[in-house]
Image: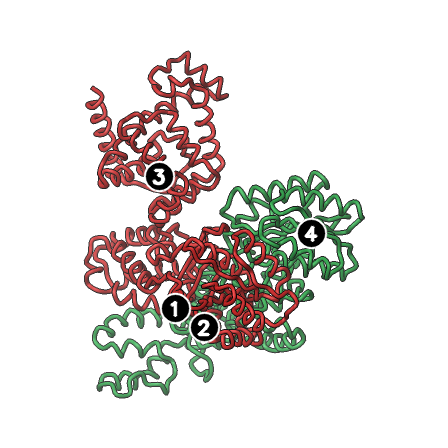
Amino acid sequence: MVFWRSKKKVDDSAAESASPSEAPVQGEAEIQAEVPPEQPAAPAPAAPASAAQPVASAAQPVAAEAPSSTAADDPPAKKGGLFARFKSGLQKTRQALNTDIRDLFKDEGRLVDDEFLGELFAKLIRTDMGAGPAEELRDDIAKRYRGRKVQLSDIIGSITEQTREMLRQDAAPLNLPGTPSVILVVGVNGSGKTTSIGKLSNHLVGQGKKVVLGAGDTFRAAAVEQLTIWSQRIGCDIVTGKPGADPASVAYQTVDKAIEIGADVAIIDTAGRLQTQSNLMQELDKIRRVVSKKIENAPHEVLLVLDATAGQNALSQASGFSDAAGCTGIVLAKLDGSARGGVILPIRRQFQLPVKFVGLGESIEDIAPFDADQFASALFSD
Amino acid sequence: MFDSLSEGLQSAFKSLRGKGKLTEGNMREGLDIVQRSLLEADVSYPVVQDFMQHVSERALGKKVLLSLRPEEELVGIVQSELTAILGPVDSSLHLKTEGPTIIMMCGLQGSGKTTTCGKLSQLLKEQKVTPLLVAADLQRPAAIEQLKVIGQQLDVPVYAEPDNKNPVEVCNNGVARAKELGSRVVILDTAGRLAIDEELMAELAKIDKKVSPDQVYLVVDGMTGQDAVNSADAFNKALELDGVVMTKLDGDARGGALLSVKHVTGVPIKFIGTGEHFDALEPFRPEGMASRILQMGDIVAAAHEAHRIVDDREREELEAKMASGDFTLDDFKNMMEKVSKPGLMGRMMGLMPGMGQFKDALESDEAAGGIRQTIGAINSMTAEERRNPKVIDSARRSRIAKGAGVQTPVISQLIKQFEFMKPMMQAMAGGSVMDRAKMMSQLQGAMSQGNGSLDGLRTKGSTGKRLSNAERAKMRKEREKLKRRKKRQGK
């Protein structure tokens, strides 16, 4: 995710790498589509080879390695017996037999075999997109290219492009129709709600908007102080309640205050809660109700703050918080680390929740509107 | 996705069994399910691959291939391997006999370091040791205040220097203060940082060097995904960890990241955090965690949870009542009230092996409404009716129904349900462990079958469990037997 920082550089290199890599892949796909009789032939050579494998492995364990190893000058067993040497000698022939006829005379590129697909799968899983989507993508590639010679980078490039397309559709800016508009921020403990609110407010203030914060996290020790410090840094109003006060009442007062001083946006913080704590989830619903009594259609935005390091549990979070609080978008926090945040792909698919902002650090300006292009290219990069 | 690994394997092997002998190729299908289950639980891919190699070696042995229930064998292998990797257990804090023991907490932002500091203090206080908390998180706004508030709540001293921007100095001064105070333990709460932030990692290493803590604990969020390997590795390289604490395991996260962390660091896992309160820190149990990662339920945790709801004396009274057959509708109501706390029943069921499928059914509003209705109906009865429901005739029934605001059939249903449960309860309380286990399975069967008239607990629609005709017949026989026995005892 280091890519996020150097925006210019990424765009250039992404454009460079994407356009040439994309073209051949798509071209190949088209060729394949034009020659339907060829299609069953593609997986066919691979099938007998894999069927033969158990037999071979029973006889000689080293031999089982041979078909999966692709580099020709990498004999699997240098000191192996006669049979092994014979096998490795046959390697080239075997590889040729496994290769699609269209790629036989291509020098570079790798054979799409189990090893190749395994490597691809590792890259996909690494992003936290989950086993299901990763398997789907891998199987799709296997269906289209098995037995052919390709560049891993080309395949990744085409997947990146698909992802980019998918994410680009939901470029959704904050919906702030009224004065004031209300933003409710929810999420599990430690996902980065308060920090995100601080950065988001600063972002909005920078756009010339008048912001009021509501310190609705009355549970965690010093959460109110934390938000107060942010409000002082930004120079905006804040409404606080006593520790242990009803967060709904703080939300109500915040909206009141926003109307009173003619603010453009009221942002309400909530205490972190796990999506399985149903009583705490009901509390969110109460906050919603209370706010909507004051202003119709409020809250206009319910942002779910997700930790980019989170794994598959983020799906459960998205579902739980959507049910209870009616989320309208996601803030993907902590994307400045080594985690990729790929879990938003299945979330996007299942819940149609767009990512609106990404958090990129602890300082006040470390927030950016979500950029599908950058996200997609960083997702599968090394 | 399958609800649990064992269910997934069961269905996979069921279809395989039809094809005759189990072969290596077939077994691979089962292994794929295992792999997928681990990935769904957020175990990092390289770790999964390594783990699967171990499991495959054992699973492809003759013993498994020839066994009658290969899915059980496979689950057993996976579970024992997981337990072996996650162990051994060492949840002691290794306090020095002389001078203060320095414990340093580190981790990513928002993993729960400060809360865990509080929980550790609570644990130490229970052992009659008062620690000194040192607020070394100088990054996040109000982190010092948070620790101070926690210190106040627990009555534990907190050392902080709000104006000092150098965490190394703060830690050193904190340790010096601990020596003055004669504290036996110092807990350093460091700032959250990203593993790739070299500057902050160097700062952490500097604290390690200058303050030389005796124990360095990494706090890991239970919901962490694939990145766990990278961050844990970076922390381990910078600091040489001594232990790991995994937090936020009170939710539905499966916590597979723990396997990744254990794999790369090799240090023992000390505690798991299971709630926001200070006593919600449990010593780590590898068996429980293995079951959790595989989504197989954890009977120990379920028992623990049950103990939290009902105290021992109450439970003994209830059991005595159940055993003697004195179990009345009043007691039934009490029980219902205990379990009707929101989310509780679902959590219990989620923890019980094999009961995961009822989780959703029990957590729904419909189920909660059913329980409320039952409690309301019992409230509308007289004391005598509650003691002896047999006296309830049609006139009484309509009176009760009116009082509870329900239709009369609901009352008849409730009484029927109670009469059905009573002998079971009696057997449960009085019988041996075997009897109880049998009864449990029977109850489960009755519930999933849908004719057990446990309507207060059941929602409409499928419960997901399918029984064969033979199983159903067996269940019916068991029930009949029970009824006969009850009749004999009654006469």
Colour representing chain A: green
**Spatial distance from mark 2 to mark 3, Cα to Cα?**
43 Å
Front-most of B395 and A380?
B395
SS state under label 4: strand
Give the quadrant of residue A12: bottom right
SS state under label 3: helix
- Nearer-N-terminus badge (2/3): 2
Q: Residue at x 21, y 75 (%)?
A: A59
The answer to whether residue A41 is seen in the rendering is: no
Chain at tag 3: B
Chain at tag 2: B
The residue at which mark 1 appears reads as B267
Front-most of A231 and B95?
B95
In the rendered structure, the answer to whether residue B153 lies left or right of residue B317 reads: right
- Closer to the camera: disc 3 or disc 4? 3
The residue at which mark 4 appears reads as A267
